[in-house]
Image (tube, rainbow, N blue to C red):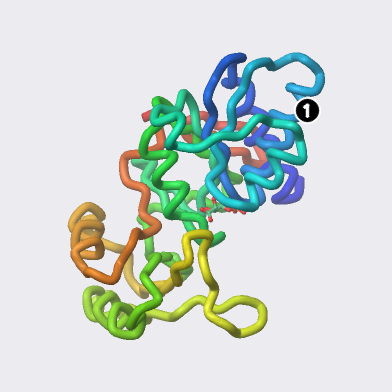
Amino acid sequence: LTQDELKKIAAYKAVEFVESGMVLGLGTGSTAKHAVDRIGELLRLGKLKNIVGIPTSKKTQEQAVSLGIPVSDLDHHSTIDLAIDGADEVDPQLNLVKGRGGSLLREKMVEGTCKKFICIVDESKLVKHLGGSGLAMPVEVVPFCWKFTANKLQNLFEDSGCVAKLRNDSKGKPFVTDNGNYIVDLYLKKDIGDLQVASDAILRIAGVVEHGMFLDMATTVIVAGELGITIKNK
Ligand code: DER
């Protein structure tokens, strides 16, 4: 099975937990895309009714609208029944790294106010500890003096051999999030120790808007692997 087929399997399994009348958080990324497609298909087939989607990015909003999924926002629905979204890393305690797609702020706002958050991944996302994979730990920062903020972040994790890099788009310009901010990616050579301590320290830096560690937020993780589907509950 290809990675995308595994993503689709996890996504379809998660949509089995969607009930008519729900207010749904719609995730962002290639895995969540399959879940949004499936929700649209079930609505079209009449197998789901009265769904309201709260998108976690402009991209997902466009996808939902194109599928005929009614969309709204947190100002109109401050509590969400179920959010379905992907992740870049999942540790054994269901802590996540998200944001390599650049949508972490709206994802964290939506997934921080839902009764249930089902995270959908293929097995390649499973890690023992967050942050040590050498892949990006995204941090959304204000554009104003971003270098100042990036240096503060780099110094914070200097004992983990951290390198902070501004994320650029395909044209080599700074990537700009849906919220008009920049992303500084942290590349760590060692696992992050105490995740909550790290989270608090990052958020104390004034130029930081939000980071990509989603701690104690997922209530369920659905993992699709070569040997089948695993459902991990908090
Ligand atoms: O950027 C994000 O937060 C995405 O949800 C990411 O974490 C997962 O993206 P993928 O499903 O394309 O791997």
Q: Is residue 85 visible?
A: yes
Q: Quadrant of the N terminus?
A: top right
User: Residue at position x 42%, y 39% from top?
Assistant: 111
Q: Farthest residue toward the front?
A: 76
| Image coords of residue 170 (percent x, y) | 66, 78
The residue that mark 1 highlights is 41
SS class, disc 1: helix
| Image coords of residue 144 (percent x, y) | 35, 79
Q: Is residue 69 above or below residue 137?
A: above
Question: Residue 160 occupies which quadrant of the picture?
Answer: bottom left
Q: Local crowd at mark 1 within 10 Å, few (<14), some, or many (≥20)?
A: some
User: Residue at position x 74%, y 14% from top?
Assistant: 47
Q: Is residue 229 above or below residue 122?
A: above
Q: Nearer the viewer, residue 22 or 232?
A: 22
Dot 1 amino acid type? Glu
Ligand 1 within 8 Å, label 1 CB? no
Q: Is residue 219 above or below residue 102?
A: above
